[in-house]
Image (cartoon, coloured by chain):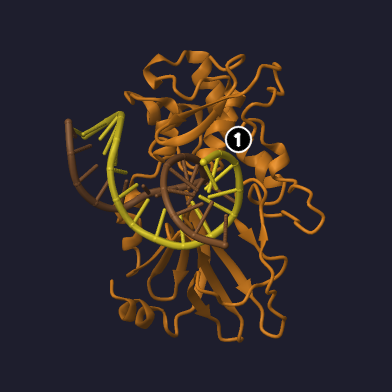
Chain colours: A orange, B yellow, C brown
DNA sequence: AGTAATCCCTGGCAGC
DNA sequence: TGCTGCCAGGGATTAC
């Protein structure tokens, strides 16, 4: 879709509801659907009229991503503005530009290939042991790659794939066809548990980061493997190792992940 | 059809 | 002070 068609399709529309599927944001409009994905560095923020913009960007010590202590002005990384009728706006900023936004006519969004392939919602009522087993049935390859594919289960990225596999005691490079019954069961339970723990600490891992005093965010503190390469495993005390699975940095415990 | 590599993009940082 | 190479929360596309 050309930018001018995108703008034309959004102008004058009313946002009826906001939903989520996997890592996709679904804005149901009075006419059509706006679907967004934040990629790795996307930031969607609500900008209030009459509040001073912060010129300060604070760098997160672990990820290097930038956050503002309050709302930020439009800069060269700000790619989308949704101007609301009250003068406020939604701002989309994305340094690496891996995020994307698509506008669909009513209902056809769910038929899009990238959304159609999404698996079970780990926090939804559909997430049952029976469906979990079916979702992974016949699947092959490294278990972490499978989790990152969004196919069997939706919503896990590099952080929570590592965290869930550690919580379940499974090596990320272990092939799905070789997982034991108890390991599948442990993974089934670990996935929503890991996500809920992170959510309870402020929505996303780093969302409540405060940079002024140099202390790490509360969200990062619940992580047990991600970003802890070389440190001791909280569960068994072994030194955490680092490798690459599915082109992504992977941290695991050689002591208690089998 | 299913799995595995490649590519998209900017910026921070370590090492020289 | 630069420069180079590597790394970073993802997934669409291409290759096998």
Residue holding disc 1: A226
Q: Is residue A156 visible?
A: no
Chain letter, disc 1 residue: A
Up-down: is A20 above or below A224?
Answer: below
* Secondary-structure class at tag 1: loop
Residue A127 picture location, percent across and down: 51, 36
Which image quarter holds the N terminus of chain A?
bottom left
Residue for point 30% across, 55% down: A111
Q: Quadrant of residue A131?
A: top left
Name the residue located 49 percent from the left edge and 58 percent from the top edge.
Answer: A38
* Closer to us: A211 or A170: A211
Position of residue A43 in the picture relative to residue A30 (left or right): right
Say above or below: A65 vs A91: above
Crowding at mark 1 (Cα within 10 Å: few <14, some 14-19, many 20+): many
| Residue A203 shows in the view | yes
- Camera-nearest residue between A247 and A90: A247
A81 vs C2, nearest the viewer:
C2
Image quadrant in which you'd find residue A237: top right
Looking at the picture, does residue A112 appear above or below residue A122? below
Residue located 42% across and 57% down the image: A98
Residue at (75, 56) in percent of width and height: A211
Picture mark count? 1
Residue B8 picture location, percent across and down: 33, 57
Task: Judge whether A212 appears above or below A156 on screen.
Answer: below
The picture places residue A107, in percent across and down from the top left corner, at 35, 63
Q: Is residue A180 left or right of residue A89?
A: left
Q: Name the one closer to the observer, A162 or A167.
A: A162
């Amino acid at each position: 879709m050309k930018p001018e068609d995108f703008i034309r399709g959004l102008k004058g529309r009313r946002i009826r509801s906001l939903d989520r599927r996997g890592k996709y944001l679904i804005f149901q409009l009075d006419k059509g659907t706006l679907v967004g994905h934040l990629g790795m560095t996307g930031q969607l923020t609500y900008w209030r009229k009459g509040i001073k913009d912060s010129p300060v960007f604070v760098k997160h010590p672990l990820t290097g991503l930038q956050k503002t202590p309050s709302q930020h002005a439009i800069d060269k990384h700000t790619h989308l503005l949704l101007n609301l009728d009250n003068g406020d706006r939604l701002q989309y900023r994305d340094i690496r530009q891996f995020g994307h936004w698509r506008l669909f006519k009513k209902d056809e969004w769910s038929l899009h290939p990238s959304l159609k392939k999404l698996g079970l919602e780990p926090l939804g009522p559909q997430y049952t042991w029976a469906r979990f087993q079916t979702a992974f049935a016949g699947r092959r390859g490294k278990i972490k790659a499978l989790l990152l594919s969004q196919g069997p289960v939706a919503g896990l990225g590099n952080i929570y794939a590592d965290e869930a596999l550690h919580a379940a005691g499974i090596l990320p490079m272990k092939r799905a066809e070789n997982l034991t019954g108890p390991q599948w069961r442990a993974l089934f339970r670990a996935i929503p548990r890991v996500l809920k723990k992170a959510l309870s600490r402020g929505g996303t891992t780093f969302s409540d980061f405060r940079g002024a005093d140099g202390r790490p965010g509360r969200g990062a503190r619940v992580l047990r493997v991600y970003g802890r390469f070389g440190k001791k495993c909280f569960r068994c005390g072994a030194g955490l190792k680092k490798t690459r699975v599915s082109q992504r940095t992977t941290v695991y415990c050689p002591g208690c992940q089998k």
